[in-house]
Image (cartoon, helix red, strand yellow):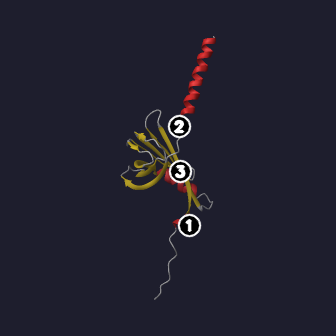
């Protein structure tokens, strides 16, 4: 049995050494650069979300697909996938387009959840997803924040100076 124990110990040491030699990467910076409407079916709304993906690392990131999920008020709001492929250069950026689907039922649940009698001053959102380059090169990203509903209100009307 000593040879089996030595084998297991050797494999464990190789795994630890492999993890220790993996360079540390900074996370991708992803923001929404734009949105466009897409045709959808009866009970859904479709949009093309354009993501600006910034690579703050010294190595390029090659990808063959993307996944995106939006949550609003801690509930899934929209999801989408894309088979777009490309390369984000070191210390560079790229636009990645992902079509997303919003179910009308999800929208109804969101509105119903906001109208549960509690005042809603701020809307919380979270965007998460990944760029996939294969089994061993998935780059995950996330961003979250909130905005005040008062920011969406129009400014007060100015009195006529006539």
Q: CA distance from mark 3 to mark 2?
A: 23 Å
Q: Which of pointers 1 and 2 lies earlier in the amino acid sequence?
A: 2
Q: Looking at this rendering, what residue extends furthest in the left direction?
A: 39
Q: Separation of disc 1 and disc 2 at Cα? A: 44 Å
Q: Residue at x 60, y 14 (%)?
A: 4
Residue highlighted by disc 1: 150
Q: Nearer the viewer, mark 3 or mark 2?
A: 2
How many residues crowd mark 1 within 10 Å: few (<14), some (14–19), many (20+)?
Answer: few
Residue 107: give x, y in percent of width and height.
49, 53
Q: Is residue 45 visible?
A: no
Residue ID for mark 2:
23
Q: Earlier in the sequence, mark 1 or mark 3?
A: 3
State the residue in front, 158 or 42: 158
What residue is pinned by disc 3? 143
In the depicted view, which residue is nearer to us: 114 or 77?
Answer: 77
Say whether residue 52 is visible.
Answer: yes
Q: Quadrant of residue 118?
A: bottom right
| Residue found at x 50% / y 77% | 157
Mark 1 vs mark 2: give the one in front: 2
Q: Where in the figure is residue 15, as x and y percent of width and height?
A: 56, 27
| Residue at the extreme bottom | 162
């Amino acid at each position: 049995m000593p040879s089996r124990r030595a084998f297991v110990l050797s494999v464990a040491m190789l795994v630890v050494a492999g993890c220790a030699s993996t360079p540390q990467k900074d996370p991708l910076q992803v923001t929404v650069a734009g949105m466009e409407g897409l045709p959808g079916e009866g009970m859904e709304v479709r949009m093309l979300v354009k993501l600006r993906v910034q690579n703050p690392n010294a190595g390029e990131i090659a990808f063959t697909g993307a996944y995106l999920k939006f949550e609003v008020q801690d509930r899934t709001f929209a999801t989408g996938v894309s088979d777009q492929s490309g390369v984000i250069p070191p210390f560079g950026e790229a636009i990645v387009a992902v079509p997303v689907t919003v179910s009308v039922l999800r929208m109804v649940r969101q509105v119903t959840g906001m109208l549960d009698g509690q005042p809603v001053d701020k809307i919380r959102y979270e965007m998460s997803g990944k760029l996939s380059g294969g089994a061993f090169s998935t780059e995950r990203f996330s961003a979250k924040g909130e905005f005040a509903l008062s920011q969406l209100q129009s400014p007060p009307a100015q009195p006529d100076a006539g």
